Image (cartoon, grey):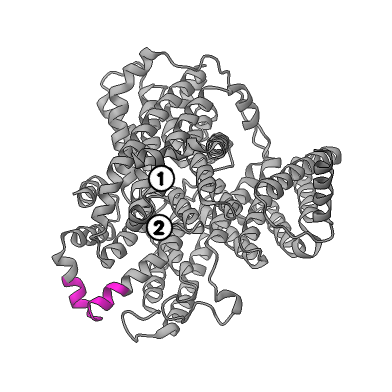
Amino acid sequence: MEILIAILTVFTQPQLLILVGIGTFAGIYIGAIPGLSVTMAVSILISFTFSWEVLPAISLMVGIYMGGVYGGSRTAILLNIPGAPSAIATAMDGYPMAQKGEAGQAIGVTTVMSFFGGLIGILVLALAAPFVSEFALTFQPRDYMLLAVLGILLVGSLSTGSLVKGIFAGALGIAIGSVGRDPLTFTERFTFDFKLMEGGISFIAVMIGMFGVSEALQQLQNVNMKSVRQKIDRIVPSFGTIKKYLPLSLQTSSIGVIIGALPGTGGDIAALMAYDHAKRVTKNPKVPFGQGAMEGLVAPETANNAAVGGAFIPMMTLGIPGDAVTAIMIGALFIHGLNPGPMLMIDQPDMFWFIVGALLTANFFMLIFGLTGIKTFTKIVEMPRSIIIPLILLLSIVGAYAVNTSITDVYWMLGFGVFGYFMRHYGYPLGPVILGVILSRLLDDNWRRAIISEREDLGRFFEGIFTSPLSLVLFVSVILIFVSQTPIWTALKRRLFGGETL
Amino acid sequence: MDPEFRGDIDHHDGTSDALPGGYVEKRRPGELGFAIFLTLASLGLLYSAYGISGFEALSSPGSVPMATTTVMLISALVVAWRTAKLPKVAGETLSKDILPVMVIIFVGFLILFGVLLKPLGFLPTSALFLVAAIKLLSRKGWGYSLTIAFLSLFVIWLVFRIVFTVLLPAGIVPEAEFIQFFRNLLSGKG
C-alpha cells in the first residue's frame, strides 16, 4: 500500500505531473531534432535544476529521458538520421517505409510499441530492483570495484569504437574523476599545485563539454544540410496490427530489459540485438528486412524502451550506470543529494517508487504526445542548424557556469569540448569517459576498502576473489573482455545475468 | 553498413559517413598526432600519479591513479602503434575535414564569451554571441540575425531567470532592478 502511494506521488502534486509531461514532450523533440541528443539535454539540464527540490527535478529529467529515447526514432524514420544511438536499428526499416509513403503508419506502430516496451521495462524494474538491491547488500567492496571496472569496459567495448580506445577513454575518465584532494587522506592528486584544481574538476563541466560543446562543434560542418519533407497521414495503428506483432514484441522487450539491466550496456545494443533476433525468428516477413519490414521496426523500438527500465536496475540498486545517459542520470541524483546504491532502496524506498511512478507516467505521456501533434512536429524538426548550434553553445556555457557560478568551470567545459571534438573525429568513444568520471570515486574507495580489509595483501585479495562465486564471475568477466578483444557477448550476458539475479 | 564499422555512435547525426568516429582501416589527418599526444599526456600523468604517494602502499591515495594512468599509457601506446601502421584516408585534409575555419572561429567565440561573461554580464555577451554566430552561420541579412538572436535570447532569459532561477552575472545591465520593476508593476495591478 505504501508502495502504491509512493508510486502515485506524481499524481498527488499537479506540479510534478506537469513537469513529467513537459519533460516527455521536450524529450521527444530533443531526441528528434538532428543535432540535439538526450545525453546533451540531460547534462545541460542538471545544471539548471540543481537548485530545485529533488522531486520536481527528477520528474523533469525522467520525462526527458523517456521521451528522448522514443524521440530518436522519429528522425530515424523520417530522415534516416537516428536522433539517438538507440534508434540506429530503427532507421534500417523505418526509413524505407517512409520512402514508400508509410511514414505515418511507421510512426504510429513505433509509438505504440515503444509504449509497450517501456511498460514491460518498468514492470521488471519494479519487480526485480528490490531483490537485486537486497542481494547487492551482500556485495563486498571488491565486488563493487570489479563491477565498476566491468561497466566501464563494457561501455568501451560494446557500444562504440575500438576496444583499446574504449579502455583508454574509461581510464581517462577515472583519472579525471580523481583530480583534486583525495577525500580519505586529503592528499592532492593531479592538481599540479594549482589552487583551483584542489576541488577537482566538476563532472558537469566534463559532461556538458563532451556531449554539448563537442557535438555542436561537429555539427558546424553540416550547417547547410537540407532536411527532407515527408508526407505523414494516418498515424494511429489498428488494433489488428498491434495484435499481430504482440508475440514478437514480448520477446524483444525481454531482450531489451535484460540487456538494459547489464551494467555497461544500454538501449543501443538492446535495439540492435532485438533487430537481429527479429530477423532470425521472422520466417516470412511480408516485406523483406531492410526494405521496410514492420518487424524490423517493432523489435528495436520495443527493446530500446524496455531497456530504459532495465538500465535503471543497476543504476538504482548498485549505483552503476548502464550507459552514458544513465551515467548522467546518476550524476543528477548525486547533485540532489541522493546516493544510488543498495542503501537507497533501504533508506529511501519512497524515492525509488517515486521514480518508478514518474517513469510510468512519462511512458503514458509518450504515448499521448507520440500519437498527436504530428504537424507541429514536422515544423520544429526543420528548425535550421544555423540557429540550433549557437543556442546549444549558449546553453552549454550558461549551464557550466550556473552550477558553481564559476568561470573556471566554463573553461573546463570548453577544454573538454574541444578535446571531445577530436575524440569524436578519431573514433574514441565518449561514453566511457563519463562513466569513468562518475565511477571514479566508487572504484577508488572500494579498492582501498577491499585491500585494507585484506591487510594490504594481494594474495589474500585474490584468494577472496576466488572463494566468492560472485567475485569470481565478475573477475572472470573482466579478464574475458581483456583477453577476447571482441565482444563475446552472448556468453557473457548469461554469466553476468545469472550472477546478478540468483 | 559495414558490420566491422563500430564508429562513434555518440555522434548520432549520421549525416555523412566520412564524419563520425574515423575509420577502422584508415588513418585520418592528425589522428597519429592525436594518438602521440595522448601517449605523452598519459606518460606525464603517470609521472604525476607516481608523485602522489609512490609505491608506499596498495591502499595509498596514489594507487588507483597510478593504475589508471598505466592503463592509459599502455592503451595509448597500442592505439598510436596501430594508427601509425594504417594507410592515410585519401582526400581528407586537416584544415578541411578535421579543423575547418568555422570550428576555430567558434572556439574563439566561446573563449571570448567566457572572458566577457563576468565583466559585461550575461545579456550583452549572449546577445553579441548569438547575433555574430547566427549571422555567420545562416549567411542571411542583419535583420534576420538580429530578430532571431534577440527573440531566442529573450526566451532563454525568461526560462532561466524565472523557471530555473539561475543566477547569471548581471554585468552592466541592471537586470535585478528591471525584474523588480515588473514585479512591482504586477503586484500593483493584482
Q: Is residue A271 above or below residue A323?
A: above
Q: Position of residue A125 (x, y in %)?
A: 33, 42
> Do badges 2 and 1 share one subunit?
no
Residue numbers of the magenta segment: A449-463
Q: Position of residue A406 (x, y in %)?
A: 66, 66
Q: Which quadrant of the rendered structure holds the N terminus of chain B?
A: top left
Q: Position of residue B78 (x, y in %)?
A: 38, 65
A158 displayed left or right of A10: left
Residue B2 appears in the rendering: no
Residue at the far left in the pictured view? A467
**SS class of the residue under badge 2?**
helix
Tell me if mark 1 has few (under 14), some (14-19) or many (20+) residues whose alpha carbon lies within 10 angstroms of its own: some
Residue under the image location 51 percent in, 58 percent down: A335
Q: Which residue is disc 2 drawn over?
A: A166
Query: Can you tell which quarter of the image residue A110 is in?
Result: top left
Q: Which residue is disc 1 drawn over?
A: B5
Residue under the image location 53 percent in, 36 percent down: A17
User: Does B117 appear in magenta?
Assistant: no
Tell me if mark 2 has few (under 14), some (14-19) or many (20+) residues whose alpha carbon lies within 10 angstroms of its own: many
Report the chain holding disc 2: A
Q: Which quadrant of the rendered structure holds the C terminus of chain B?
A: top right
Residue type for callout 2: Gly
Q: Quick one: A458 or B98, which is closer to the camera?
A: A458
User: Does A456 appear in magenta?
Assistant: yes
A230 displayed left or right of A7: right
**SS class of the residue under badge 1?**
loop
